[in-house]
């Protein structure tokens, strides 16, 4: 009986190993930025349902949770490559995690394609780490143009999360452009997980801020907005793609009405590719609501990785990594993706506003 | 295109500057009082359990978190009115505290104190992980669970102005209604505990347990029941603190109890661990200094948690038993 069981197990394992190509997905399914991970996973799953095969074999997605944590980012990357034997990795999500986990991908020569890490350090001097989204030097320009040109702010308080590479980099690019546009900027600091921002908000109000810019993640954006409104700050609040999840509205409520943010994609923006139409239709059919930004990015990352495997023509990790870097004019949901020699995608920035508790597409800024 | 790398996060921290605008200082004092009142309330339960059992209950912050989830689900799933949900959530927190004691602490009642401490840390991790598995790791909103009017601000001074088509009050010193309620609840808890510990029979048994468990047991007191009661009461206080915290900072996630629990621990030690009035005083002072420090030195805001421990070290090096703590007599 036991022998039979062992034989069956071996047969089962070898069959499943033969019949599928394993792709890792390292996402923050729990922890501070879990909302990003959950949305991206929806997109990856949906894409896997619509395009389940490559090179005549099934693609099996191995989902690993990095707990939104830098140390786990490294451990999960190691596990995906050494134990799960994935041919490429979709992930990771926030910049600090991708920077940490990216070193493992580099050492082992496995392609890691991030759906959403925008800090320049993510791909800098890397051969195997790429992204399908824009990076912060451009997002910073777009956000500063929004604040100083479109909204006419003069003196902006920037709330910097000192623990996040994303926030620090984004804030600095914002400041650079602000200086070029002749606006003034001052920083307030906090760190991920803080709940009370009353001291920083009071300080920013006393320094005469004409707008708040929060280049952080949704939990803190929502709380800062609530406390700013409570303490009598009625001027505009601006954020980056870290605000593009429904949790911003659920937690922030009335306080985030009127909030503008820069982001990758909005389902309300005009669809430019066949994939964009397909994505919105398939998502709406499955979940009965419009898809979010990060879901679209997850969908795109899967398509880009699948396309690279197809062009590589094999499951050789090195060949796939090369093919990822040679992605050219790929018609994805969030735009036409071309990955340049640095591993970055050059894409436009969408401006979205929160109105009556809903995301409303405003405009697009092209690079 | 050469990309410039952003400077290291630490380069920000030195960019200091001191801000001493009197109006902002006053507002920050009030902000600190508002945060401190929450620390105080959580610290009361912490210090009570320590005072009676000599056990630092690291799971206190996680019972705090569980209570908030209970309240959330009583309102969203069971559709109960908010006040009923709050009462039931606090009762469930008490029951959870009682259960934790029965399962985790009771078997090691006679083991060295360090075993109990490590068990408490284990319970803390267990509850956090359980919450991740059961409630998922995504933060949930607590905003619509309780009446929004609790988060209105009491505004003193300021002028009416029209901004963006709405008539609003600009300036003024502001204090949230919920923080006033928190202060009142903390005061009630303080008086109630004094009455309970010094005027009731169970309280007398608790005091006896705090002196000597074995002798108390020999006097015919059901020690396990008294200790269970202590945990239930401490956990109920954690639950009340959790719900008030979540109304003020309306997001709920499995690790939300960690930092408040840590701060309450600091506040309790700061005020003299085991002393209930000390915990309230410690909580208020900690909240006020923390917010004032960020308000005065905005550049150092990233160090606010480290700052809490820094004050603790200073106070303990001057007065090792804390502000209102009695010095411990060590018998040789």
Image (cartoon, helix red, strand yellow):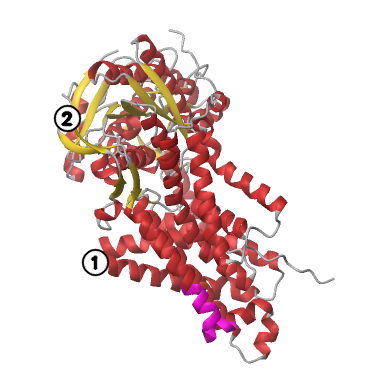
Please tell me which residue is depicted at 22% across the width and 19% down the height of the picture.
A364
> Is B125 drawn above or below residue A334 in the view shown?
below
Boundaries of the magenta span: B192-205
- Label 2 crowd bin: few (<14), some (14–19), many (20+), radius 10 Å: some
Q: Residue at x 30, y 12 (%)?
A: A367
Q: Is residue A270 left or right of residue A77?
A: left
Residue drawn at x 41%, y 14% is A176
Residue B271: where, in percent of width, then height? 60, 58
Q: Is residue A291 above or below residue A110?
A: below
Residue B291 x %, y %: 48, 42
Q: Report in which chain the residue with disc 1 lies.
A: B
- Disc 1: which residue: B81
- Tell me where residue A182 appears, x and y as whole percent: 35, 11
Residue in the foreground of this view, choosing between A222 and B100: A222
Label 2 marks a residue whose chain is A
| Label 1: how many Cα within 10 Å (few below 14, some 14–19, many 20+) | few
Residue located 63% across and 67% down the image: B55
Asked if residue B298 lies left or right of residue B322, the reply is left
Distance from disc 2 to disc 1, alpha carbons, whole Å, reads 37 Å
Q: Is residue A26 visible?
A: no
Query: Mark 2: which secondary structure?
Result: loop
- If the image is split into quadrants, where does the N terminus of chain B sit? top left
**Label 2, on which residue?**
A268
Dividing the image into 4 quarters, which one contains the C terminus of chain B?
bottom right
């Amino acid at each position: 009986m036991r022998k039979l069981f062992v034989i069956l197990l071996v047969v089962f394992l070898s069959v499943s190993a033969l019949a599928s190509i394993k792709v890792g997905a390292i996402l923050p399914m729990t922890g501070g930025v879990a909302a990003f991970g959950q949305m991206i996973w929806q997109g990856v799953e949906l894409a896997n349902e619509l395009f389940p095969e490559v090179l005549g074999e099934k693609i099996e997605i191995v989902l690993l949770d990095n707990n939104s944590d830098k140390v786990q980012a490294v451990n999960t990357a190691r596990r995906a490559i050494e134990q799960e034997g994935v041919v490429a990795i979709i992930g990771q999500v926030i910049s600090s995690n991708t920077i940490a986990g990216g070193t493992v991908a580099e050492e082992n020569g496995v392609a890691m394609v991030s759906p959403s890490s925008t800090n320049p350090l993510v791909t800098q001097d890397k051969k195997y780490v790429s992204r399908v989204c824009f990076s912060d030097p451009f997002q910073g320009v777009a956000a500063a143009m929004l604040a100083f040109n479109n909204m006419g702010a003069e003196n902006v308080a920037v709330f910097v999360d000192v623990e996040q590479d994303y926030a620090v980099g984004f804030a600095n690019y914002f400041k650079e452009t602000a200086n070029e546009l002749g606006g003034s900027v001052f920083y307030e600091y906090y760190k991920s997980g803080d709940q009370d921002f009353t001291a920083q908000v009071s300080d920013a109000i006393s320094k005469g801020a004409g707008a708040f810019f929060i280049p952080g993640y949704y939990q803190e954006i929502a709380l800062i907005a609530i406390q700013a409104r409570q303490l009598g700050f009625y001027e505009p609040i601006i954020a980056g793609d870290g605000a593009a999840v429904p949790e911003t509205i659920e937690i922030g409520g009335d306080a985030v009405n009127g909030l503008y943010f820069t982001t990758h994609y909005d389902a309300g923006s005009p669809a430019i590719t066949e994939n964009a139409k397909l994505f919105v239709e398939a998502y709406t059919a499955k979940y009965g609501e419009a898809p979010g930004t990060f879901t679209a990015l997850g969908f795109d990352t899967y398509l880009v990785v699948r396309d690279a495997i197809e062009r590589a023509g094999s499951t050789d990790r090195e060949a796939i990594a090369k093919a990822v870097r040679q992605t050219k004019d790929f018609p994805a949901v969030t735009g036409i993706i071309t990955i340049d020699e640095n591993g970055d995608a050059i894409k436009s920035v969408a401006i979205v506003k929160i109105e009556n508790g809903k995301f409303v597409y405003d405009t697009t800024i092209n690079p | 295109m050469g990309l410039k790398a952003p400077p290291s996060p630490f380069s920000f921290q030195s960019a200091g500057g001191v801000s001493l605008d009197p109006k902002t200082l006053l507002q920050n004092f009030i902000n600190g009082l508002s945060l401190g009142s929450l620390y105080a309330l959580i610290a009361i339960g912490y210090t009570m359990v320590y005072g009676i059992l000599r056990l630092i209950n690291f799971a206190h912050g996680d019972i705090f978190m569980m209570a908030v989830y209970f309240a959330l689900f009583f309102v969203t799933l069971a559709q109960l009115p908010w006040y009923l949900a709050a009462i039931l959530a606090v009762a469930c927190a008490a029951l959870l505290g009682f259960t934790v004691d029965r399962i985790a602490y009771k078997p090691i009642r006679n083991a060295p104190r360090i075993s109990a401490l490590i068990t408490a840390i284990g319970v803390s991790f267990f509850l956090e992980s359980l919450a991740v598995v059961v409630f998922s790791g995504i933060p949930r909103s607590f905003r619509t669970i309780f009446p929004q009017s609790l988060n209105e601000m009491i505004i003193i001074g300021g002028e009416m102005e029209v901004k963006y088509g709405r008539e609003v009050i600009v300036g003024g010193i502001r204090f949230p209604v919920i923080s006033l309620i928190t202060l009142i609840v903390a005061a009630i808890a303080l008086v109630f505990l004094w009455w309970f510990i010094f005027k009731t029979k169970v309280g007398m048994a608790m005091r006896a347990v705090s002196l000597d468990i074995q002798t108390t047991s020999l006097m015919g007191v059901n020690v396990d029941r008294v200790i269970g009661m202590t945990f239930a009461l401490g956990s109920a206080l954690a639950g009340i603190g959790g719900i008030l915290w979540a109304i003020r900072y309306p997001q709920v996630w499995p690790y939300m109890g960690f930092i408040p629990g840590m701060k309450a621990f600091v506040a309790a030690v700061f005020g003299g661990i085991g002393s209930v009035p000390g915990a309230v005083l410690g909580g208020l002072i900690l909240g006020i200094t923390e917010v004032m420090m960020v308000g005065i030195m905005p550049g150092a805001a990233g160090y606010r948690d480290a700052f809490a421990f820094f004050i603790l070290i200073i106070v303990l090096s001057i007065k090792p038993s804390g502000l209102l703590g009695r010095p411990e007599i060590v018998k040789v």
